[in-house]
Image: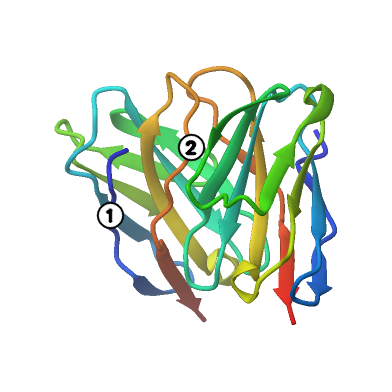
């Protein structure tokens, strides 16, 4: 169990650019989640995958955000035309497909928009 | 999902027992109670989870009264490295559950 891995750990970009983050969940974890966390706040849910199917999206996930999980393994989160308000820590979590199983989080990608 | 209320911050000293209480008055029958710990620049780390009565692991204990409207995370003999934000969450664990985090409790442990 190598844990949830996220890449990159930090991303600095100019407003208007596109960025893509990657998450590698714990192997054999069917469920994968994306969260966003801003300073002083708890993480906020963005979207959820069961294997390769994206089953839920938060209202926080605007049209500029898209997430994929091809083949039910790693996942990517893309933000198009970044805005200042997108600056945050983007966290990925995974869990097994069973009741009462906790989510295991990666250490996130910190996005800074200049 | 049931909302939770917990203190914004707590202070303690090394070696003391720390109890963080969380209120969840609207907890549903299928809801479990889960606590996470988060250090700066890291993702939340699962600490403990329970449904009723008492749960204990190598890190902490979780006390849940019969009405389940509150829960208490107990950290025995804290050290400086326990300084972190602690989140209490409730959610239906029989289906997939999107976790709803509040602002958590910032625990500061001093020498």
Q: Is residue B28 left or right of residue A100?
A: left
Determine whether label 2 and label 1 are within 8 Å by CB: no
Color theme of the render = rainbow
The 10 Å Cα crowd at callout 1, few under 14, some 14 to 19, many 20 or more, is: some
Residue at the (50%, 49%) spot, across then down: B36
Given residues B70 and B56, the one toward you in this image is: B70
**Split into 4 quadrants, where in the image is the C terminus of chain A?**
bottom right
Q: Is residue B36 left or right of residue A30?
A: left
Q: Is residue A23 left or right of residue B69?
A: right
Residue at the (54%, 64%) spot, across then down: B82
The chain identifier of the residue carrying mark 1 reads B
- Point out which mark residue B21 bears: 1
Q: Which residue is mark 2?
A: B98
The 10 Å Cα crowd at callout 2, few under 14, some 14 to 19, many 20 or more, is: many
Q: Is residue B89 visible?
A: yes
User: Residue A6's x, y, as percent?
Assistant: 80, 50
User: Residue B9's x, y, as percent?
Assistant: 36, 72
């Amino acid at each position: 169990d190598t844990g949830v891995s996220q890449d990159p750990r930090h991303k600095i970009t100019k407003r208007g650019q596109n960025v893509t983050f990657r998450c590698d969940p714990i192997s054999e974890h069917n469920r994968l989640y994306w969260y966003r966390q801003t300073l002083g706040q708890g993480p906020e849910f963005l979207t959820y995958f069961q294997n390769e199917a994206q089953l839920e999206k938060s209202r926080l996930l605007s049209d500029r955000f898209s997430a994929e999980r091809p083949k039910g393994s790693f996942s990517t989160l893309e933000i198009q035309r970044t805005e200042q308000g997108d600056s945050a820590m983007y966290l990925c979590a995974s869990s097994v497909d069973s009741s009462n199983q906790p989510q295991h989080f990666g250490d996130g990608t910190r996005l800074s928009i200049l | 999902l049931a909302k939770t209320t917990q203190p914004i911050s707590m202070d303690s000293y090394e070696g003391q027992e720390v109890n963080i209480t969380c209120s969840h008055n609207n907890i549903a029958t299928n809801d479990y109670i889960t606590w996470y710990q988060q250090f700066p620049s890291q993702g939340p780390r699962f600490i403990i989870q329970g449904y009723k009565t008492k749960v204990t692991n190598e890190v902490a204990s979780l006390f849940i009264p019969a009405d389940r409207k509150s829960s208490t995370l107990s950290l025995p003999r804290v050290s400086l490295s326990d300084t972190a934000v602690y989140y209490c969450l409730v959610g239906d664990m029989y289906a997939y559950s999107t976790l709803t985090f509040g602002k958590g409790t910032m625990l500061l442990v001093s020498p």
